[in-house]
Image (cartoon, grey):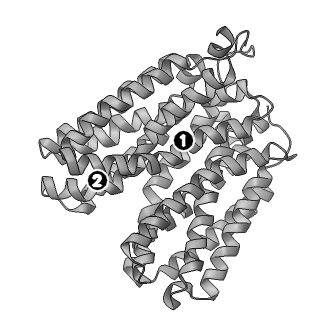
């Protein structure tokens, strides 16, 4: 029993999944935003900002709370639990009170802080326990974040139909508290682990000026921005092509599975490579390739549904793989000391991409009426990221 209570699965992998499968339901916002907008008498565009605020605070809280996570994972995971659950339940109350500002505060700010700390807390612990398979470990955990939408979507839909939109938030707040608190209690670094000695943590100014870090940040930012630009248009692209609602739902689940599979597959494959940056190069090359094929065949306008589905699945896989490969690439370049702080700073790219990705594609579609034009822009951005991966992200470790 002692071995069962003190191994890499019960002390790292399972608690990470409990935390990430809970906070990953932030991506279920698309399921509830219309009902919320109708209930409080606001437009969907106004309500949509709650999600953007949540992603922004996710990235920024991770960036600024890296030292807290580095110092005490139990404190950070407990704060994450309290903030996420309070924000989730508070969103239900704000909806009940028909307060848009309350929704922004609860779902956006409070829950966003819980998201950032909850996302970051298990990562270093996973890499310590799975020192020979860091990519597989972080991939499994981050896959939980991607799979959360697949798991929670039918549950949330069922609860909305049975108890209503407000009580759905209250019921799931209790469920997520139990899951996250259990993850918080189980999460533990390996016995005998001693932090590397040194003065304080990493110096933020030096990290932000480091060319390798800048290159990784830019690659990560571009990958998320392009991913969100296309993923956010998934339903509209397929609807324009005349695809039925049932098939769209099936494609949505399929693309979510590719998102999660990319998180595991790309990061696990990186464990066997000499340089993990090769994975980012592969992601960008695949994304450019499928985008060019889709452009040249004019797949959207010509109704080539299978090609559009392949595009969405490839983009989703690369989007997920970019997340899971980030902490391990950073640890290879900068070492394990202060990795939580460095990873947190890199996640600030997620904050800004959360504000720019959806808006980029929405602007292009509204201005030109063409989804293909979105592909032109994202293909150029992927090409820029590919150049950065060769030029800035050197293979030697930076201490």
Up-down relation of residue 118 to residue 161 (above or below): above
Q: Position of residue 375 (x, y in %)?
A: 56, 76
Please determine whether, in this image, residue 126 is positioned above or below residue 30. Answer: above
Place residue 89 in its image quadrant.
top left
In the current view of this chain or complex, which residue is farthest to the front?
1
> Please, is residue 304 above or below residue 20 in the view?
below
Question: Horizontal placement of 398 versus 143: left or right?
Answer: right
The N terminus - image quarter: top right
Residue drawn where x is 49% and y is 67% of the image = 251
Which label number is shown at residue 32? 2
Q: Secondary structure at mark 2?
A: helix
Comparing 83 with 380, the one in front is: 83
Percent from the top left, x then y, of residue 210? 71, 41
Labels in figure, total: 2
Query: Could you say which disc has been placed on residue 144 in the image?
Result: 1
Specify whether 341 is left or right of 373.
Answer: right
Residue in the image at 46% along x and 53% along y: 354
Classify 124 as above or below 266.
above
């Amino acid at each position: 029993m002692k071995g069962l209570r003190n191994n890499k699965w019960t002390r790292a992998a399972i608690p990470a999944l409990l935390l990430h499968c809970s906070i990953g339901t932030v991506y279920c916002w698309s399921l509830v935003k219309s009902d919320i907008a109708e209930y409080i008498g606001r437009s969907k565009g106004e309500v949509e900002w709650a999600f953007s605020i949540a992603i922004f605070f996710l990235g920024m809280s991770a960036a600024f709370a890296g030292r807290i996570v580095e110092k005490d994972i139990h404190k950070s995971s407990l704060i994450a639990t309290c903030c996420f659950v309070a924000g989730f339940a508070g969103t239900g109350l704000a909806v009940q009170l028909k307060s848009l500002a309350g929704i922004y505060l609860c779902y956006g700010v409070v829950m966003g802080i819980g998201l950032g700390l909850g996302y970051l807390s298990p990562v270093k612990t996973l890499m310590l326990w799975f020192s020979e398979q860091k990519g597989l470990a972080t991939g499994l955990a981050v896959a939980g974040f991607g799979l959360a939408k697949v798991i929670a979507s039918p549950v949330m839909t069922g609860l909305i139909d049975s108890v209503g939109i407000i009580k759905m938030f209250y019921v799931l707040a209790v469920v997520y508290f139990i899951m996250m608190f259990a993850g918080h209690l189980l999460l533990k670094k390996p016995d005998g682990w001693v932090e590397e000695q040194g003065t304080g943590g990493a110096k933020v100014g030096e990290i932000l000026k480091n060319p390798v870090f800048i290159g990784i940040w830019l690659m990560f930012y571009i990958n998320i921005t392009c991913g969100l630009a296309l993923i956010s248009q998934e339903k509209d692209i397929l609807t324009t092509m005349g695809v039925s609602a049932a098939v769209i739902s099936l494609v949505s689940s399929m693309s979510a599975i590719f998102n999660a599979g990319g998180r595991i597959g790309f990061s696990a494959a990186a464990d066997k490579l000499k340089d993990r940056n090769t994975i980012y190069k592969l992601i960008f090359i695949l994304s450019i390739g499928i985008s060019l094929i889709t452009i040249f065949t004019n797949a959207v306008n010509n109704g080539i549904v299978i090609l559009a589905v392949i595009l969405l699945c490839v983009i989703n896989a690369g989007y997920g793989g970019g997340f899971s490969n980030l902490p391990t690439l950073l640890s290879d370049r900068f070492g394990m000391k202060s990795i939580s702080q460095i990873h947190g700073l890199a996640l600030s790219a997620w904050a800004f991409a959360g504000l720019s990705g959806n808006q980029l594609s929405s602007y292009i579609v509204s201005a030109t009426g063409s989804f293909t034009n979105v592909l032109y822009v994202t293909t150029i951005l992927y090409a820029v990221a590919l150049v950065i991966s060769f030029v800035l992200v050197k293979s030697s470790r930076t201490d």
